[in-house]
Amino acid sequence: MFVMAGGLGMVVPILPVFVRDLGATGVWLGLAFSGFAITQTPLTPIVGRLGDRLGRRRFILAGLSVYVFIGVGLSMADSYHIVTLLRMGMGVGAACMFPSALAMVGELAPKGHEGRYMGLFMVSFTAGFGFGPLVGGVLKDNFGVDTTFLALSGAAAVAVLMVTFLLPTVAGASKSDEQVVPSFREMAGDLRVWSLMVFNYTFGLGMGSVFTFIAIFMSESLLASATLVGVVVGSRAIISSIFQPLFGRLADHMPRSLLVIGGGLLMAAGTEALPLATSVAILLVLFLLLGLSESAALPSSLAITTDLGRIYGYGTLIGFTNAVLIMGVLTGSVGGSLIESGGSIEDVFRTAGLVIAVGVMAFTITWSQGRRRAMRVLQT
């Protein structure tokens, strides 16, 4: 996961500027960055469900293999339409890989230690995604954008080899094959599941709006190089990877919903404040704040997902929650493009911060109602 996330992170500081240079504007700018959501959203629940029945290793390998070819394709792309199609292909790979890996770790987590396991595992993703933008920015400034895309293919190829030779064939399959997975109707009737959906959508919307426009905001308003963009973008993930194990352990000893709410509100405040940044240094501080908010909320929400996954199937529930998160990314990216077309990038960040705050309030209400309903059912 570290190797793959690093490869994905490499393209974050350069892709929005790259497609704008190719002529993308408005909705096309958003689609070129978040087009992966169009394919990942419907496929993720399907792959998650199949992983519960068939095992997960084959889906991880398939997803990683897709990225080997995508990186080469991006290095040869000469129009933003082709970039958008390739980003949609990346969604197919992500749909196979990410829910399968998360479900496998969720299956390994002992009851009562879900936060600790998820907090530790997500370090691999956030640390990789943190170092990736810095590496991508340096490669672009010194060797050109094509080199960065080819580095994505190289990272994916390394990950394929690691999974092939290091991941046991039986991992993720032995328990899954014995698990009786409840129907979708039973899962949809649990308000706690809906609260997770609300949070994941909110979290994804914040990511989509910020990551789509931060590189353009920095290069145009702050005259920052690709390397500086990589440092700022990567700082969020690096600080998140440092604190996630701590908050993951904390999530096993206190109400997890409180950490989700606190982290979500901090994320809303940090996103709302982005337009106030008048220098790269101020923006770096705000991204460190966003990383801290992410480290508080993410392990706790994944721990809740893992706990409920024992009831509804790890891959099934993670697949649905991940699909909703990606739907939020698409909304933040494309919706932000529409807002930017009629206003400014600053308006995108302000709107996203407000929507995140509303989403956290909706999570709070839905989780509280779902918890009370589950307790009544248990007592009955």
Image: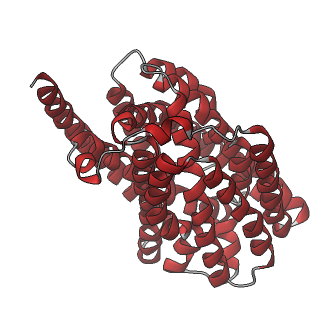
Residue 137 visible, this orientation: no
Q: Is residue 140 above or below residue 367?
A: below
Left or right of 68 on screen, residue 178: left
Q: Nearer the viewer, residue 304 or 226?
A: 304
Left or right of 135 on screen, residue 243: left
| Horizontal and vertical percent position of residue 163 | 74, 45
Q: Quadrant of residue 71?
A: bottom right
Residue 13 visible, this orientation: yes
| Picture residue at 73% right of the left edge, 55% below the top | 10
| Horizontal and vertical percent position of residue 340 | 46, 71
Q: Nearer the viewer, residue 182 or 1?
A: 182
| Picture residue at 68% right of the left edge, 67% below the top | 15
| Horizontal and vertical percent position of residue 178 | 45, 38
Left or right of 287 on screen, residue 350: left
- In this view, which residue lies farthest toward the left? 380
Scheme of colours in the image: secondary structure
Q: Is residue 349 above or below residue 298?
A: below
Can you say which quadrant of the picture contains the C terminus?
top left
- In this view, which residue lies farthest toward the front? 178
Q: Is residue 273 above or below residue 27?
A: above
State how many labels appear.
Answer: 0
- In this view, which residue lies farthest toward the right? 143
Q: Quadrant of residue 13?
A: bottom right
Can you say which quadrant of the picture contains the N terminus?
top right
Q: Is residue 369 above or below residue 213?
A: above
| Picture residue at 64% right of the left edge, 41% below the top | 125
| Horizontal and vertical percent position of residue 182 | 31, 45
Q: Nearer the viewer, residue 38 or 185?
A: 185
| Picture residue at 24% right of the left edge, 45% below the top | 362
